Image (cartoon, rainbow, N blue to C red):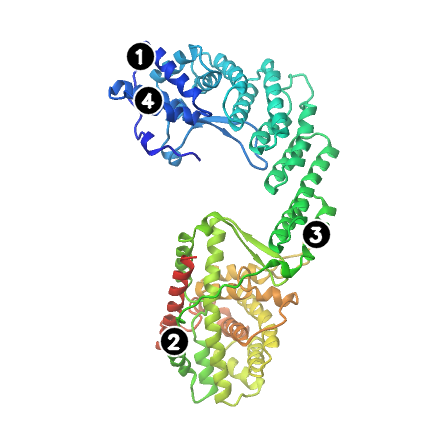
């Protein structure tokens, strides 16, 4: 949106008193400014620069005259928008302050100025704006001012204003005559619109901002008499211009706007389908011309989304086929690594690992099960993410997208909240990777120090010590045995679905109605992890641990749950396996045996969810781990903020 130059701002309404004797001088000032300008804003700026403003009365007069030309014609733009234009003030700071004042708040002295200036033999652009202002202010005889505004805006097409401004004036003229049913003026406006669109489409450099707003009005059809058919008559040339524009304007947002026009306005289904297919073909053509994998994938994805939205099934299938066939080597991925000294000193890691040097394996595992969330504090991570976004211009002006393990576009993040959640997750994933190293080292240290018992004995101890569900305890014991045997893929594949099973068990014990009954062709079934986890949060589940499970298993995190379920998890390192075991150990040991007394005590379950590691007091070792994590997050915040 245009901004008002600092030297031209006025915080308070100007004290102005109309002087009839000054009208010829004002008329000359306005005409001189018009002759040197190509739009209303330039007229206002030139008038503000008039000399001889020492006299407060003349200064007020000059300011009020200049402010007249800061009212703007605002077009309705974008896919699915309504046709037309409104006349409104140039807002400086949103709804709380206007420059100039809202039209309906204009006082009688200014209305006199506009009326007298309009009565002068003045240029069509000036006449159109003044008559429009008086019409919008509901000055006496508004129909007369409306007709004069329409006629003047049409006459202004022979003036020196730019094409975009001429287009806006015609769209405003169309809006006025439609609102009042001025059918006798429709032909002149339509003819002027047709002329401007045709000349623009034939120009060497064609401006879509000139064509599309007018084209949307023409496709709305002509005014209908009360007894005429319900469907408006669309000028034949307007349909021709629509297809010419589709041939000329092939970028995604312009093709989509034209497609929406065809869908909303054309009465012929065959023509509508043809227009939609031409728009989709524009997107496919852009993809074919690209050699960069990212850009090619972008165009194909946009084309597939477009085709799906308008039920062009054959085109959607072709887009998907081409998207799947994009050569991964053309994506030109770049890996960015942070240099410098590691934020975690070897002495810190060694100090922490010493807590697992216990005389018995069971004691070491208890220490492991009491470690804090690998992603750290959710509040701290959110603070870091907000700091990163506030210091990054890229985050403010651009969206983000992720690619899945399949190498294809997976999800886009465009709103402020989506970007924040994505950035929080990024902080969590980086912190989680660091803790994965420590947790895997801790498990490895146990295997080096102790004799590993049989899986059944280990599971029996978990049940006896924690009173947890025997099946989940057995899964935890088997996962640990697979880890210590170096079989990390099987360890993760076994543990991940059992995490979901443990959360489902907890919700059922809390009497949460989660089962989805059969409906039509949908089978009766329990929901997935992404649906159940928020329900567990509702019962007070520690947000730090909830964030960890999301970051590990769901999107936009590492999404291990879906990768494993769909066969994309072909390799798992020991750090990832250790993180999966930590997630399973948390929820498996929280889920009590169904026949136990605790299973019937909802408050006891909720308390364990709030303090899943046995309490809210941190041990010395926990503080040490959080200290290491905070150092990492601090450096991450600084580095990300500079990107």
Percent from the top left, x then y, of residue 530? 56, 60
Look at the image and tell me whether residue 106 can be seen: no
Quarter of the image that includes the C terminus: bottom left
Task: Tell which residue pokes out farthest to the left in this image.
Answer: 55
Observer-nearest residue: 596 or 387?
Answer: 387
Tell me what residue is drawn at x 61 percent, y 42 percent: 252
Observer-nearest residue: 69 or 146?
Answer: 69
Dividing the picture into quadrants, the one containing residue 532 is bottom right
Which mark, residue 50?
4
Quarter of the image that includes the N terminus: top left
Query: Does residue 220 appear left or right of residue 56 in this picture?
Result: right
Percent from the top left, x then y, of residue 28? 38, 14
Say which element carries label 1: loop
Would you name the residue on which mark 2 appears? 345
Which mark, residue 19?
1
State the CA–CA distance, disc 1 to disc 4.
18 Å
Give the mark, 1 or 3, whose residue is nearer the N terminus.
Answer: 1
State the CA–CA distance, disc 2 to disc 4.
69 Å
Give the mark, 2 or 4, whose residue is nearer the N terminus.
Answer: 4
State the CA–CA distance, disc 1 to disc 3.
77 Å
Which mark, residue 520?
3
Foreground mark, 1 or 3, reads 1
Total numbered labels placed on residues in the image: 4
Tell me what residue is drawn at x 43 percent, y 73 percent: 613
Give the mark, 2 or 3, whose residue is nearer the N terminus.
Answer: 2
Circles 2 and 3 in contact, beta carbons < 8 Å: no
Say which element carries label 3: loop
The 10 Å Cα crowd at callout 1, few under 14, some 14 to 19, many 20 or more, is few
């Amino acid at each position: 949106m245009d901004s008002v130059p600092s030297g031209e701002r006025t915080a308070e309404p100007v004290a102005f008193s109309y002087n009839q004797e000054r009208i010829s001088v004002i008329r000359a000032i306005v005409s001189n400014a018009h002759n040197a300008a190509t739009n209303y804003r330039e007229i206002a700026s030139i008038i503000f620069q008039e000399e001889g403003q020492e006299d407060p009365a003349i200064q007020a007069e000059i300011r009020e005259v200049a402010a007249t030309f800061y009212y703007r014609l605002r077009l309705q733009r974008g896919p699915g928008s309504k046709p037309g234009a409104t006349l409104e003030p140039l807002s400086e700071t949103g709804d709380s302050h206007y420059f100039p004042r809202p039209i309906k708040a204009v006082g009688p002295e200014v209305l006199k100025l506009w009326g007298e200036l309009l009565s002068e033999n003045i240029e069509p652009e000036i006449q159109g704006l003044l008559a429009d202002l008086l019409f919008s202010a509901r000055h006496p005889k508004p129909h007369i001012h409306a007709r004069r505004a329409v006629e003047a805006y049409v006459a202004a097409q022979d003036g020196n204003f730019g094409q975009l401004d001429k287009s806006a004036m015609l769209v405003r003229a169309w809006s006025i005559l439609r609102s009042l049913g001025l059918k006798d003026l429709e032909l002149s406006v339509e003819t002027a619109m047709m002329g401007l669109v045709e000349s623009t489409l034939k120009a060497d450099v064609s401006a879509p901002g000139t064509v599309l707003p007018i084209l949307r009005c023409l496709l709305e059809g002509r005014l209908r008499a009360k007894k005429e058919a319900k469907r408006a008559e669309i000028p034949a040339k307007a349909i021709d211009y629509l297809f010419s524009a589709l041939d000329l304007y092939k970028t995604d947002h312009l093709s989509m706007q034209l497609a929406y026009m065809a869908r909303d306005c054309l009465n012929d289904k065959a023509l509508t389908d043809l227009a939609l297919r031409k728009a989709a073909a524009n997107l496919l053509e852009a993809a074919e011309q690209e050699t960069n994998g990212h850009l090619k994938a972008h165009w194909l994805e946009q084309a597939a989304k477009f085709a799906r939205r308008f039920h062009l099934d054959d085109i959607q299938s072709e887009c998907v086929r081409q998207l799947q066939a994009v050569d991964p080597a053309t994506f030109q991925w770049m890996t960015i690594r942070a240099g410098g000294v590691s934020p975690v000193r070897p002495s810190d890691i060694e100090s922490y690992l010493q807590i697992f040097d216990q005389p018995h394996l069971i004691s070491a595992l208890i220490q492991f099960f009491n470690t804090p969330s690998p992603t750290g504090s959710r509040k701290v991570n959110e603070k870091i993410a907000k700091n990163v976004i506030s210091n990054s211009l890229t985050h403010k002006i651009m969206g983000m997208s992720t690619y899945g393990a399949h190498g294809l576009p997976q999800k886009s993040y465009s709103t402020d909240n989506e970007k924040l959640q994505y950035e929080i997750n990024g902080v969590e994933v980086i912190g989680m990777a660091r803790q994965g190293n420590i947790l895997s080292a801790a498990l490895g240290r146990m295997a080096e120090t102790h004799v590993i018992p049989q899986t059944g004995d280990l599971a029996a101890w978990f049940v006896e010590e924690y009173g947890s569900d025997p099946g989940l305890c057995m899964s935890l014991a088997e996962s640990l045995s697979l880890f210590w045997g170096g079989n990390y893929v099987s360890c993760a594949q076994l543990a991940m679905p059992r995490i979901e099973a443990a959360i489902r068990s907890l919700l059922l014990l809390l009497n949460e109605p989660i089962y989805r009954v059969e409906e039509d062709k949908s089978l009766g079934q329990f929901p997935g992890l992404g649906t159940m986890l928020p329900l567990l949060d509702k019962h007070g589940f520690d947000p730090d641990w909830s964030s960890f499970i999301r970051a590990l298993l769901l999107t936009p995190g590492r999404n291990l749950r879906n990768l494993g379920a769909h066969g994309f998890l072909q390799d798992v390192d020991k750090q990832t396996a250790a993180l999966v075991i930590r997630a399973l150990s948390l929820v498996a040991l929280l889920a009590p045996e169904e026949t136990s007394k605790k299973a019937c005590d909802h408050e006891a379950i909720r308390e364990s969810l709030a303090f899943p590691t046995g309490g809210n007091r941190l041990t010395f070792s926990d503080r040490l781990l959080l200290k290491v994590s905070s150092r990492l997050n601090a450096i991450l915040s600084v580095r990300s903020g500079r990107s």
